[in-house]
Amino acid sequence: MAVIYEVNMSWEENVRLVTPYVPGEQPKEKNIIKLNTNENPYPPSPEAAKVLKGFDAELLKKYPDPNVTLLRESIAKYHGVKTSQVFAGVGSDDVLGMAFLTFFGGEEPVLFPDLTYSFYPVWSELYRIPFTEIPLDDTFRIRPSDYRIPCGGVIFPNPNAPTGIYETKEVIREILNDHPDVVVIVDEAYIDFAGENASVLDLIPEYENLLVTRTFSKSRSMAGARIAYAVGSEKLIDYLMAIRNSYNSYTMNSVSIAAGVASVEDDGYFRESVEKIKTTRDRFTEEIRTMGFTVLPSSANFVFAAPPAPHTAEEVFLKAREKGIYFRHFSSLRANPYLRITIGTDEEMDQVLRFFREEI
């Protein structure tokens, strides 16, 4: 005789539900102009390429260094800090996700802008972190006074994504002064395109609660290697390392570690690549402004631009896609009128300009 069990709960009721982050499209077609994910159009450092070509595959049979010592030492030397002040992870999303998990465990909401990196609310929901989105002002800038409320932490990119707007150190210092009792994270994924002395790394000695995150995916042309890091006080890094080692000790592979060290040490190539992108960005911005585009002032390797009426961003996005040109378009209310256009090579941006002249 069969036994019939009464089911009181579906297993799906125990599933952690979250609306996932949607990454930029990675098209497989050849001969396209891919300007939708803010990758660097130039190759990585030739020194990193040499490391990859000469890498001893025998090393892959062993686990990588869990402390990523060589890369952390190289980054620490580059920035003039202690190795114990550097945390390395598998891309910014790994580093930032760990930071959310580590530092945003309070009952008060974490604060970040309403138009910003769209992974922030995803991590908040995933880790059950309360959050409040603080509206940018009418010029898409942060008002520090709006952050002067009780909170469990603050995070924002600088320059911001997707707007490309850079906030001064005075703005960030004001937020830090208002919140000495929580961790403030400045996501500097695009800071290398903002100019000399733009970073707030120099504020770390003053603020034990400041964490600055960086990535090799943009200015160092290594998005495929998945390398990122955070710099902060030794206490902050100790907390991050403890959480990382409670989750996955062997996060970064041996190949990425070796290539990352080579990239850091080839500073001349890095600076040359950054300057080329900045020059192309400024030229492209002026060109499309003459066509009637509204372009926000960008300090990143992309521009946030709204096409002139009667054209809509969605219309231009779809037409460009048909021509093999990929931009990024966001559906949120404030971002909807704009296209985020990654800066490619001069040749690629000239083709985009020709497309605009034909269609707009």
Image: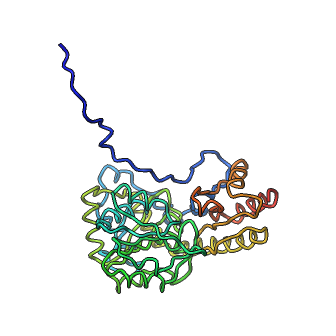
The correct choice, above or below, for 172 with respect to 317 in the image is below
The location of residue 343, given as percent across then percent down, is 64, 65
Viewer-side residue, 47 vs 143: 143
Q: Residue at x 47, y 66 (%)?
A: 216
Tell me the quarter of the image containing the N terminus: top left
User: Residue lying farthest right?
Assistant: 358
Q: Which quadrant of the view contains residue 338?
A: bottom right
Q: Residue at x 67, y 51 (%)?
A: 32
Residue 146 relative to residue 356: left or right:
left
The location of residue 220, given as percent across then percent down, is 52, 67
Tell me the quarter of the image containing the C terminus: bottom right
User: Residue lying farthest top?
Assistant: 1
Residue 222 relative to residue 74: left or right:
right
Image label count = 0
The correct choice, above or below, for 86 with respect to 356 in the image is below
Q: Which quadrant of the view contains residue 28?
A: top right
The correct choice, above or below, for 200 with respect to 7 in the image is below
The correct choice, above or below, for 181 with respect to 319 in the image is below
Q: Residue at x 53, y 66 (%)?
A: 115
Q: Which quadrant of the view contains residue 101?
A: bottom left
